[in-house]
Image: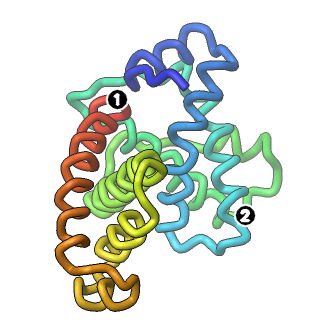
């Protein structure tokens, strides 16, 4: 999959509303929208509906969206759209047409929502990065690094996986710079 910068991808969607650009947008941002909606405490069996509704609103609103980096990150706008969907669902709008008419996306972001957005964004790109890196690692390197990310101690990992502590430390020192580099790249590409 090509990775356009976020601004280029948004412009392509805005200008052409092409299916390829939209599919790329969904591939990149759908998992983030899912994480954000989940963080609002939505019931597990309702999250997917909120994600789909948020994507529908994005599809409708992106052509008129003007990205202004000085006013905030694009992910903040996505977070506001998701929050609006969750809030409006709670208001029990009965018909889709009524929902589409009444939805208003706030132009400012409360500090609470900004914090949620930033936290979920970091979790999202870290997971995306890990999913890309882990396939190139040995099983023990992958398992030991995942355990370290979960906060398990070196002694516990060493005993559980039957590998020396120093091997775990060496794996961490090799993997961490790769992750940091890739996370920085994802931040540049996706915002």
Q: Which residue lies furthest to the right in this view?
A: 95
Location of residue 98 by image quarter: top right
Question: In this figure, what is the number of numbered marks?
Answer: 2
User: Whole-percent x and y of residue 145?
Assistant: 33, 68
Q: Is residue 114 left or right of residue 59?
A: left
Residue on which disc 2 sits: 92
Residue pictured at 72% horizontal, 63% vertical: 92
Question: Is the residue 135 above or below the residue 147 in the image?
Answer: above
Image quarter where the N terminus lies is: top right
Can residue 54 be seen? yes
Helix, strand or loop at label 2? It is loop
Image position of 101 with respect to 111: above or below: above
Q: What's the residue at 65%, 63% (across, down)?
A: 47
Residue at (55% x, 31% y) in the render? 25
Select label 2 or label 1 by which is in front: 1
Left or right relative to 152: residue 65? right
User: Is 152 placed above or below 184 here?
Assistant: below
Measured from the top left, where is residue 99 in percent x and y?
Answer: 71, 46
Judging by the rendered image, the residue that carries numbered circle 1 is: 189
The crowd level at tag 1 (other Cα within 10 Å; few <14, some 14-19, many 20+) is some
Image location (x, y in percent) of residue 122: 32, 54
Secondary element at image label 1: helix
Q: Which of 25 and 146 is in front in this view?
A: 146
Tell me which residue sits at (25%, 33%) in the image: 71
Mark 2 is surrounded, within 10 Å at the Cα level, by few (under 14), some (14 to 19) or many (20 or more) other residues, namely few
Q: Distance from label 2 to label 1 (Cα)? A: 37 Å
N-terminal of the pair, mark 2 or mark 1, is 2
Here the colouring is: rainbow
């Amino acid at each position: 999959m090509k990775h356009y910068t976020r601004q280029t991808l948004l412009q392509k969607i805005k200008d052409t509303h092409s299916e390829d650009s939209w599919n790329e947008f969904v591939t990149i941002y759908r998992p983030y929208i899912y994480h954000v909606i989940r963080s609002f405490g939505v019931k597990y069996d309702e999250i997917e509906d909120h994600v789909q509704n948020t994507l529908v609103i994005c599809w409708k609103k992106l052509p008129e969206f003007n990205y202004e980096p000085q006013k905030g990150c694009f992910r903040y706008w996505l977070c506001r759209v998701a929050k609006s969907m969750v809030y409006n669902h709670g208001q029990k709008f009965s018909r889709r047409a009524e929902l589409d008419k009444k939805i208003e996306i706030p132009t400012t972001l409360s500090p609470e929502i900004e914090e949620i957005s930033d936290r979920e964004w970091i979790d999202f790109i870290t997971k995306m990065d890990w999913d890309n890196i882990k396939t190139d690692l040995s099983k023990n390197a992958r398992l030991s690094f995942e355990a370290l990310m979960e906060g398990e101690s070196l002694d516990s990992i060493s005993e559980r996986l039957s590998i020396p502590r120093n091997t775990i430390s060496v794996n961490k020192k090799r993997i961490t710079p790769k992750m940091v580099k890739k996370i920085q790249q994802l931040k540049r590409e996706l915002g």
